[in-house]
Image (cartoon, grey):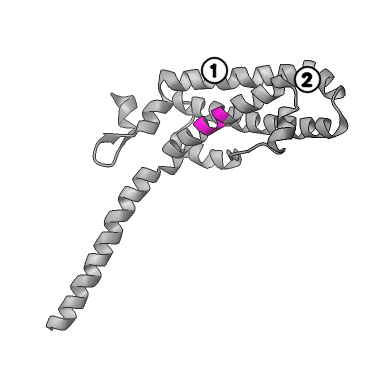
Amino acid sequence: MSSVSGFIENGGAVSFGHRLAGSDAFKSLFKEGMYLVEMSAAYLDGPGRLEAKALPRATALAYASESMRLTTRLMQMASWLLMQRAVNEGEMALAQAALEKNKVKLTRQELSCDPETFASLPEVLQDLCDQSMRLQARIIHLDSLLYQGPARESSRARPIAIESQLAMLREAFHMREG
């Protein structure tokens, strides 16, 4: 119960993001992310290098650009996953992770080339890019649940906004009555 007590927020509700981050689903996401990093590194350092040399110049430039974006995307996700695993295992506090995550720029990175050029790239690179963007979307969503808390912020902002509006109305009516 004590592990859950750290996740209690706003009137005793347990944050879905925190439960998800500590679940088997996160462990699966972590494994998937690390496996994708390993697969990509093995491909880019091996067969991918050979395939890139055989490409026409324009396609080879697109290959270089997409492989750099893939690497950047994967390193951002791996950093985030490792940090979140440290939080889950009690090696880092959530508040510390929130501060540290500013060093990990988890941003959505789209493809750098047009769809036609992307289709001319080796299939393995296309597949790795597609997988990494799907994984990136899932991680960004989990990050927003954990650290940005749009539902919590909007639920807090509304009562404050409503209270201030009511206070202004009361003041306006008091001025007329008095």
* Location of residue 47 with respect to 84 vertically, above or below: above
Q: Which residue was labeled with disc 1?
A: 31
Q: Gap in Å between the C-alphas at discs 2 and 1?
A: 23 Å
**Magenta residues (range):** 134-138
* Location of residue 61 with respect to 43 vertically, above or below: below
Neighbourhood count class around disc 1 (C-alpha, 10 Å): few under 14, some 14–19, many 20 upward: few
Within the magenta stretch, is there residue 136?
Answer: yes
Within the magenta stretch, is there residue 130?
Answer: no
Residue 75: quarter of image: top right
Q: Which residue was labeled with disc 2?
A: 48
Residue 76: quarter of image: top right
Expressed as whole percent of the image width and height from the top left, the position of residue 175 reads: 18, 81
Q: Is residue 50 left or right of residue 72?
A: right
Question: Label for residue 78?
Answer: none
Q: Is residue 178 left or right of residue 9?
A: left
Q: Please tell me which residue is depicted at 31% across the width and 51% down the height of the picture.
A: 156
| Quadrant (top left, top right, bottom left, bottom right) of the C terminus | bottom left
- Is the stretch drawn in magenta largely helix, strand or loop? helix
Residue 150: quarter of image: top left
Q: Secondary structure at mark 2?
A: helix
Q: Is residue 163 left or right of residue 76?
A: left
* Nearer-the-camera pick, 71 or 64: 64
Expressed as whole percent of the image width and height from the top left, the position of residue 152 reads: 35, 45
